[in-house]
Image (tube, rainbow, N blue to C red):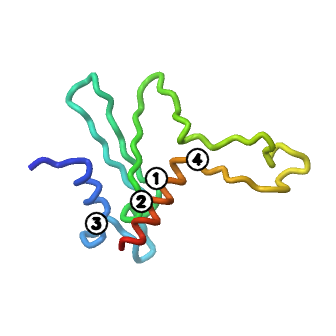
Amino acid sequence: GHITAETLMSILRDKDSGICVDAEGFRTAGSMVSVLPRDPALPCVHFFTATPDPSRSVFKPFVFVAGIKPVPQVRSPTFLQDPAKQIPRFQSSVDRRHELYRRHQAALELMERDR
């Protein structure tokens, strides 16, 4: 049959098969699925968990092409009154999580709730 990126992600999340490991002092460190189109005009898309335990992770898409500009969703926010740049330093704290990370955490919470 036809294997999709979603099929491969499901396989990499499968603990019963032993592909996704979280036991005996060993844990799957991260997983990656790549979509390599036959049309050379289309970019390849690589999906990374970038977190341990793919069964609990979201596969995030990345495209590597020349001249790509980072999107705001993956940049840590900046602050006018940044505690790291004030003296004395770090007298207060700010949330530096970028939007993609926050959404990953929200998706993880949903996955945990649906178990």
At label 3, the amino acid type is Asp
Between discs 2 and 4, the one toward the N terminus: 2
Q: Residue 86 versus residue 32: which sits nearer the camera?
A: 86
Q: Where residue 13 sits: x, y (%)?
A: 32, 63
Quarter placement of the C terminus: bottom left
Horizontal side of 25 relative to 37 (left or right) equals right
Between discs 4 and 3, the one toward the N terminus: 3
Between discs 3 and 2, the one toward the N terminus: 3
Q: Are marks 2 and 4 in contact (CB under 8 Å)?
A: no
- The residue carrying pointer 4 sits among few (fewer than 14), some (14 to 19) or many (20 or more) residues within 10 Å by Cα, namely some
Residue that label 3 marks: 14
- The residue carrying pointer 3 sits among few (fewer than 14), some (14 to 19) or many (20 or more) residues within 10 Å by Cα, namely some
Residue that label 2 marks: 57
Q: Where residue 57 sits: x, y (%)?
A: 41, 59
Dot 2 falls on a residue whose secondary structure is loop
Name the mark on residue 98: 4
What is the spatial separation of the Cα atoms under label 4 and label 3, in whole angstroms? 29 Å
Dot 3 falls on a residue whose secondary structure is loop
Q: Are marks 4 and 1 in contact (CB under 8 Å)?
A: no
Q: Are marks 1 and 2 in contact (CB under 8 Å)?
A: yes
At label 2, the amino acid type is Ser
Q: Where residue 103 sits: x, y (%)?
A: 49, 53
What is the spatial separation of the Cα atoms under label 1 and label 2, in whole angstroms? 8 Å
Q: Residue 25 versus residue 80: which sits nearer the camera?
A: 80
Q: Nearer the viewer, mark 4 or mark 1?
A: 4
Horizontal side of 112 relative to 40 (left or right) equals right
At label 4, the amino acid type is His
Residue positioned 39% across, 66% down in the render: 111
Name the mark on residue 50: 1
